[in-house]
Amino acid sequence: MTHIIRNIVRPSPEQQKMAAEFPPATLHEAQARRGAIDHSIRPIYNGMTVCGPAVTVTCAPGDNLMLIAALDVCQPGDVLVVSAGGLREQGGFGEVLSTACMAKGIAGLVIDACVRDGEAIHKLGFPVFATGLAMQGTVKETLGTVNAPIVLGGIYIEPGDIISGDDDGLVVVRKDDIEETCRESRTRDNKEAVMMHKLREGANMLELTGLRSVLEKKGCVWE
């Protein structure tokens, strides 16, 4: 069994820049509401954002050995995406590993477990999306995988897929879908900009969206 895959196919720099133009909610809507990671995995502080290709990691619960090993294969702009078994009693990532990630130019961490040193991470400004904070540390004992497909927060993720996150949550955009999703996102943004302009000028929301007729067809009655 191969535990660590060094070389993965990443989106082009142009594709990564394109995806970073849109917030996760827009990307999610643009790809038919697919790819939303479970909302329990959130930024540990408001205002954290992340967007980049996934380096996927599988760790045993309470063990961060493979997370550390993954740093060796990360490139600037990558996002560490760690399936750690959902354990919330331990924090296998903190100030030291945040410092290591920032030194390598890693864009952020997404993990389905807790982290620790929250205040220090906040001061460093390293984006971390996790299930919470927990002070208890982890061991470094068990082999897992780096850059094999994983399931995290209910979503299947392959290495190189785009991970985008902000205060609203996280979304996955498949490598092969980036350009189409971004085109749809741009169309959606333009449509909403026109709508908001009309609303500012006094347009009626029900008329503008066509929802009045939807309500009428469902038998909605006004008094």
Image: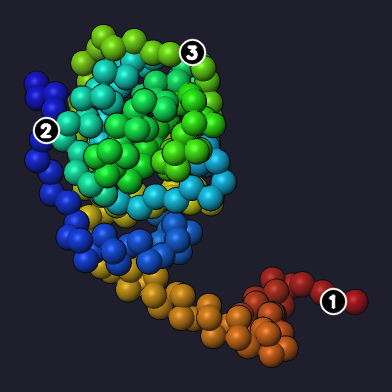
Establish if 40 lies above or below 77. above
Image coordinates for residue 49, horizontal then vertical, percent:
44, 51
Q: Residue at x 72, y 88 (%)?
A: 202
Residue beneath disc 2: 5
- For badge 2, the amino acid type reads Ile
Structural crowding at the residue carrying mark 2, measured as other residues with C-alpha within 10 Å and reported as few (<14), some (14–19) or many (≥20): some
Mark 1–mark 2 Cα distance, whole angstroms, equals 62 Å
Who comes first in sequence, dot 1 or dot 3?
A: 3
Structural crowding at the residue carrying mark 3, measured as other residues with C-alpha within 10 Å and reported as few (<14), some (14–19) or many (≥20): some
- For badge 3, the amino acid type reads Gln
Residue beneath disc 1: 222
Looking at the figure, which quarter contains the C terminus? Answer: bottom right
Instruction: Classify mark 3: helix, strand or loop.
Output: loop
Q: Which is more foreground, mark 1 or mark 2? A: 2
Mark 1–mark 3 Cα distance, whole angstroms, equals 57 Å
Residue beneath disc 3: 136
Are the residues flagged by discs 1 and 3 in contact, CB closer than 8 Å? no
Mark 3–mark 2 Cα distance, whole angstroms, equals 30 Å
- Looking at the rendered structure, which numbered label has been put on residue 17? none
Establish if 8 lies above or below 58. below
Image coordinates for residue 171, horizontal then vertical, percent:
40, 50
Image coordinates for residue 192, horizontal then vertical, percent:
53, 78
Structural crowding at the residue carrying mark 1, measured as other residues with C-alpha within 10 Å and reported as few (<14), some (14–19) or many (≥20): few
- Residue 85, located in which quarter of the rendered image? top left
Lateral position of residue 136 relative to residue 197, left or right: left
Who comes first in sequence, dot 3 or dot 2?
A: 2
In depth, the one of 50 and 212 nearer the eye is 50
Instruction: Classify mark 2: helix, strand or loop.
Output: loop
Q: Which is more foreground, mark 3 or mark 2? A: 3
- Residue 199, located in which quarter of the rendered image? bottom right
